[in-house]
Amino acid sequence: SIATELLARYERFKLQELNINQMVLCNGSMHVEMAQLRLIQKLLLNKWSGPSVARLSSRRTLAKNLRNIYADSSQISEQEISALWHMMSYNQGRRVLHKTTQYIKQRYTYWYRWIGALQTTELPIHIIWAKEDPVAVIQMATTLHQEINNSQLTLLDDLGHFPMLESPQRWSRAVIESLGF
């Protein structure tokens, strides 16, 4: 969302102080209409159920949902789940957890602006996508690749929705290589 908004501003206003040479997009639901949202995401998005679901959420719920979006559920450790839960629940985080999913609505609201910027940009855009992502499905990556003029597509086998957590080395290598280093 942030990258595509920056690109939209760059393209629209030709901002000289914003020096973008290229972009890397990874498993984001830019084409939100293709997203296979999980039940928990839908419940949190709903203005009626969201606050209650957030307050009732637990470490166990988080663990179950994370394991369902990893390509290999054994790749996430109990320690990582505990760390994520701690960050999410710190300082009464469950009170605002439902608000963190509102970025999904922004992707609908700004769809034409953000997808339009991707479709018209001349900047090189490298798309790095996990093939087994059950939320931001592979069709998003192939659609983006087809509609972005100057794009390159790298698919990461055997990774799910969080490739940067599931295999930090493979994901980092793909990003570094896409930037030409």
Image: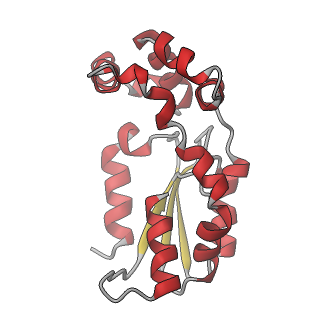
Q: Can residue 123 be seen in this view?
A: no
Which residue lies at the image location 33% right of the left edge and 80% below the top edge?
18
Residue 67: where, in percent of width, then height?
Answer: 50, 23
* Frontmost residue, 107 versus 69: 107
Residue 180: where, in percent of width, then height?
Answer: 32, 76
Q: Which residue of the protein is positioned furthest toward the right in this rendering?
A: 33
Which residue lies at the image location 66% right of the left edge and 51% below the top edge?
32
Q: How is the image coloured?
A: secondary structure
In this rendering, position of residue 42 left or right of residue 82: right
Is 125 drawn above or below residue 79 in the view shown? below
Residue 28: where, in percent of width, then height?
Answer: 53, 52
Give the image quarter of residue 142.
Answer: bottom right
In this rendering, position of residue 107 left or right of residue 67: right
Which residue lies at the image location 62% right of the left edge and 70% below the top edge?
113
In this rendering, position of residue 114 left or right of residue 83: right
* Frontmost residue, 69 versus 75: 69
